[in-house]
Amino acid sequence: MFILEKTTEQVKEVRVVRSVYFDHSGTTPVHPAVAEEMYRYLIGDSFGNPSSVNHLGLQVRKKVTEARDIAAQAIGAAPGEIVFTSGGTESDNMAIHGAAYTNKSRGNHIITSAVEHHAVLNTVKALGKQGFNITILPVDQYGMVSVDDVAAAITDRTILITIMHANNEVGTIMPIAEIGKLARERKIVFHVDAVQSFGKIPVNVDELGANLLSLSGHKIYGPKGIGVLYIRKGTRWRQTLFHGGAQERLRRAGTENIPGIMGLAKAIELAMENREAESARLMVLRDKLIKGLTSIENVRLTGHPVKRLPNHASFLFKCIEGESMLISLDMKRIAASTGSACTSGSLEPSHVLLAMGIPHADAHGSLRLTLGKDNTDDDVDYLLEVIKPIVEKLRNMSPLED
Amino acid sequence: MYSEKVMDHFTNPRNVGEIPNADGVGEVGNPVCGDIMKIYIKVKDNVIKDIKFKTFGCGAAIATSSMVTEMAKYKSLEEALKLSNSQVAEALGGLPPIKMHCSNLAADALHAAVNNFRKNEQVIK
Ligand SMILES: Cc1ncc(COP(=O)(O)O)c(C=O)c1O
Ligand code: FES
């Protein structure tokens, strides 16, 4: 992507600066076709409330039904199993809290992993303070959950297993189908956070064996603040967090976010159309990034070398702090991300990297580059070119010995 | 997030490096986020004649290191000891609240270097 830096009348020469967005796991730009679709539901007479019995409401209601069909088809679900939410965080909270409380008479044990997104991990931890017993499974050096560990953790009291499909920080793809099989055999509710995997690798609720599955709009070129919770028919789950109207068949109260739902449906449609070709294209760029960066001294890949998202490259740079690397890259107009303590707000390094056994000091030097639709081979070359002097400069400044 | 001054000192840090036979060296680790800063000083007639730093830390840590070396250069040891983290942060046009602890690192490293110099001096005497 190119952007114009300055265009005053006096300036004859327009400076064109390369601008590269490598943070698609953080969020994605809204696809123009998605924005267009949303706009249609913000203007004119498309403002109806789908619960209202008048022609405006009914017209919108029909559209929501279409959107639900699109979402259902994308993950191999039935339309009645799709609930629109305000995003990945709400889907995770709703899924976990609802499953825990609905199954309270059957047991009180919940299993999750140490590398889950905070939307899952903190929800489970909160339940740990409300009388539930929680097991947080460790991961291996690649951030991978072991199926055997899940099997060993299951007890007669286990009511819920929640494991992510792909990790947002290191891109590792978990053995979800095998865990799903275990859960089904033991009749335990299984929730999968598929926020990062959806649109990049196949996500099919039957193949994964999921009872509950979370999706988010803004990771797939859709809008922020919209998501999906898939709830398999017959799953012991009830809405336990939000009380209100009877929308979404009593599963999610509140007047529907129509522009969000319509934008999300458009984004899902585009994702399904483009997924295979786009993933293949990005995998080539990803591997070039990995090869280029790991050829720099004391830089290594984090996450699984093979079982990883096609657009995801993450690294550790020894003796460099992530925020200073990010600022330096940003000055070259490259947007990336890090799990360094210095950027975390809590000043704690990434719980994912720590769970993988990476020492606190090394976690400082983490860099995540996640690719998307506008990235080109030139972008990768540009990053590889500008990062070397940055690394050299910051390492020269570092009091740590390699 | 950062002021222009911070960005300036981050991009063009002053006095980066080591002083091979420094008269005083101060190294401090940041207990909050785990970063490390090292300051080297050369002292003559109770005045800091040369000062250099090495820092492993965030943008604010690098900028405050750079600023503190500028502020301390040619100051007497007493003046250097009086330099506080808030003065460094102020000289940089302020820091985001969550980054204030990084400026502690700079002042602490400077004070540690001065104290180290004084200790060395006593040993020699
Ligand atoms: C794995 C995972 N789960 C959940 C979320 C939260 O989604 P949202 O931002 O839509 O609330 C994210 C996004 O950061 C994520 O990466
Ligand atoms: S040095 Fe870690 S936050 Fe500043």
Image (cartoon, coloured by chain):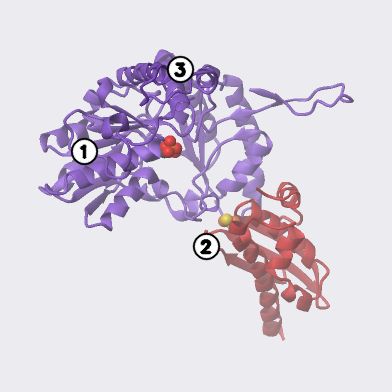
Question: Which chain can be seen in red?
Answer: B
* CB contact under 8 Å: marks 3 and 1: no
Look at label 1 and name its amino acid.
Trp
Question: Which chain can be seen in purple?
Answer: A
**Which residue matches tag 2?**
B32
Measured Cα–Cα span from mark 3 to mark 1:
35 Å
For the residue pair A369 and A27, the one nearer the viewer reads as A27
Image location of residue A95, percent across then percent down: 28, 39
Measured Cα–Cα span from mark 2 to mark 1:
42 Å
For the residue pair A59 and A136, the one nearer the viewer reads as A59
**Which residue matches tag 1?**
A237
Look at label 3 and name its amino acid.
Glu
SS label for mark 1:
loop
Q: Is mark 2 within 8 Å of ligand 2?
A: yes
Q: Are both tags, 2 and 3, on one chain?
A: no
For the residue pair A110 and A304, the one nearer the viewer reads as A110
